Image (cartoon, coloured by chain):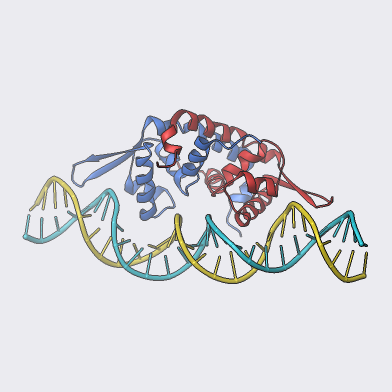
Chain colours: A blue, B red, C yellow, D cyan
Amino acid sequence: MEKLCPRFEKAMGLLSKRWVGLILFELLQGPKRFSEMETDLPISGRLLSDRLKTLEKEGIVKRTIYSEFPVRIEYSLSDKGKALEPVIKEIQNWAEDFITYEEVEPKS
Amino acid sequence: MEKLCPRFEKAMGLLSKRWVGLILFELLQGPKRFSEMETDLPISGRLLSDRLKTLEKEGIVKRTIYSEFPVRIEYSLSDKGKALEPVIKEIQNWAEDFITYEEVEPKS
DNA sequence: GACATTTAGTTACTTTTAGTAATTAATAGA
DNA sequence: TCTATTAATTACTAAAAGTAACTAAATGTC
């Protein structure tokens, strides 16, 4: 078999972290504040903070502080982060084609 | 902001499960046996079994039993599974472009 | 037919990660 | 200095992953 590529493995390790996909989807729409993301996504502050820190360390997300009142902190995608758009797009395409309505409906 | 699509959320939930990406990468090369995948991937039998069961239930993976001696069981991708190839390909592209050698090297 | 051999799982147990809620830090304006 | 607001962190509980030993199934051999 074709050997597992270490780069692919590393990439998968990042992207398969819970919530990372949704955070990327959110940030592809433009810069977002912490509280906005907390509201939009079904993720707690504790993990959102953790994931943003990881993504920042990986150079995927950029953190900008605006010293206003009250303090405003914006998260946005770096070039490395924006380059993940095709990945997210392909997942969307697949989801539209193969995930049925019933699968996402809560059990009645 | 643009509302989170439930289908996308469901798809992300599946794909962001640990090891699922690597399992898909493996199966995109062709049908594989349990023990082959266990050897190729850095995943234990317990979780491999669990993931394959989930993917089978989701209609992504097909399980075929060959009653030979010794018994042979093959896992392969359904159409729904094969349709994930563009996703995996885009992750590979991104990894090649943005994951550096140092990032995947063990600390020396 | 009992038994050995091989693949494919499962079970029982420990460690790590995620989820929840309350608390704290930081900052500027009143 | 005190208040208001956002952005986290901490302490605790629940769920998921990792590890290793064990079991199930199936067929060929004696």
Left or right: A33 with respect to B102?
left
The residue shown at (38%, 39%) is A58
Count the marks: how many? 0
Q: Is residue A57 visible?
A: yes
Residue D29 at what x, y percent from top left?
90, 57
Above or below — where is A9 with respect to C13?
Answer: above
D6 or D26: nearer the eye?
A: D26
A48 or C21: nearer the eye?
A: A48
- Quarter of the image for the C terminus of chain B: give it: top left
Above or below — where is A9 with respect to C18?
Answer: above
Residue B44 at what x, y percent from top left?
60, 53
The residue shown at (58%, 50%) is B43
Left or right: C20 with respect to A74?
right
Residue A45 at what x, y percent from top left?
36, 54
The residue shown at (62%, 43%) is B40
Q: Quadrant of residue D3?
A: bottom left
- Quarter of the image for the N terminus of chain B: give it: top left
Q: Is residue B4 visible?
A: no
Above or below — where is D8 with respect to C24?
Answer: above
The residue shown at (64%, 40%) is B26
